Image (cartoon, rainbow, N blue to C red):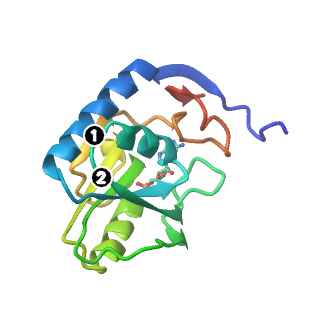
Amino acid sequence: MPLMAELRPIEILLSEAQIQKRVAELAAEIRRDFPDDLHVIAVLKGAFIFLSDLIRHMPGHVSMDFMAVSSYAKATKTSGEVRLLKDLDTTLEGRNVVIVEDIVDTGLTLTYLQEILRARNPRSLRTACLLSKPSRRQVDVKVEYIGFTIEDRFVVGYGLDYAEQYRNLPHIAVVG
Ligand code: 5GP
């Protein structure tokens, strides 16, 4: 089915090799901070590839769960509205939890997630984001592990979509 707009990946921003190297570093950092008990929560759909690469770089035990929220519809604009579409399967009580997210843009999605997850009494709650666009921030949200800081460009690939396309790219590209 043709896309409504003609936006497509035009420029590779982060290569597969750059991403893989950085993800391995992040995994090592997280594992150092939480050598034993670690429960990671991926935010669907965008974080699923980041999560799968991240956990494969972590020796030892790691459990995981998934949640889904909507902030973007099929467009490239922030609605400001965040809805919980899929909740977790298990409790967070007393666990060391790391939220795994694809990108922090305005920060609205993560602020919402951190609030509802903190209310479930984890022992600790941290956040890992592959990408961050600090120039777009509307709320001051804390992200302990950041893969790459990027400029305000709409990116796709490595789990990130434009109208549900391009999630399967092994690199991160700018659309135009
Ligand atoms: P925030 O609530 O921080 O504004 O938005 C976070 C969500 O917006 C991300 O999880 C992601 O789904 C989406 N998003 C923000 N920037 C981009 C981008 O450049 N590309 C894509 N594909 N999604 C983005």
In this rendering, position of residue 29 left or right of residue 81: left
Q: Give the mark, 1 or 2, whose residue is nearer the N terminus.
A: 1
- Residue 94 in the image: state x and y as whole percent: 22, 75
Q: Residue at x 60, y 38 (%)?
A: 167
Residue in front for this viewpoint, 69 or 76: 69
Percent position of residue 135, x then y:
32, 43
- Picture quadrant where residue 124 is located: bottom left
Which quadrant of the figure contains the N terminus?
Answer: top right
Q: Secondary structure at mark 2?
A: loop
23 above or below 78?
A: above
Q: Provide the residue designation for mark 2.
A: 61
Q: CA distance from mark 1 to mark 2?
A: 13 Å
Q: Amino acid at mark 1?
A: Ala
Which residue is at the front of the view, 77 or 111?
111
CB contact under 8 Å: marks 1 and 2: no
Q: Residues within 10 Å of mark 2 (few under 14, many from 20)?
A: few
Q: In the displayed orientation, state which residue is furthest to the left.
A: 33
**Point 54% across, 61% down: residue:** 79
Q: Amino acid at mark 2?
A: His
The x, y position of residue 163, in whole percent, is 67, 45
Could you tell me residue 89's position as x and y percent? 48, 73
Image mark for residue 111:
none
Q: Which residue is mark 1?
A: 27
| Residue 138 in view, yes or no | yes
Q: Residue at x 83, y 36 (%)?
A: 2
Looking at the image, is mark 1 or mark 2 nearer the viewer? 2
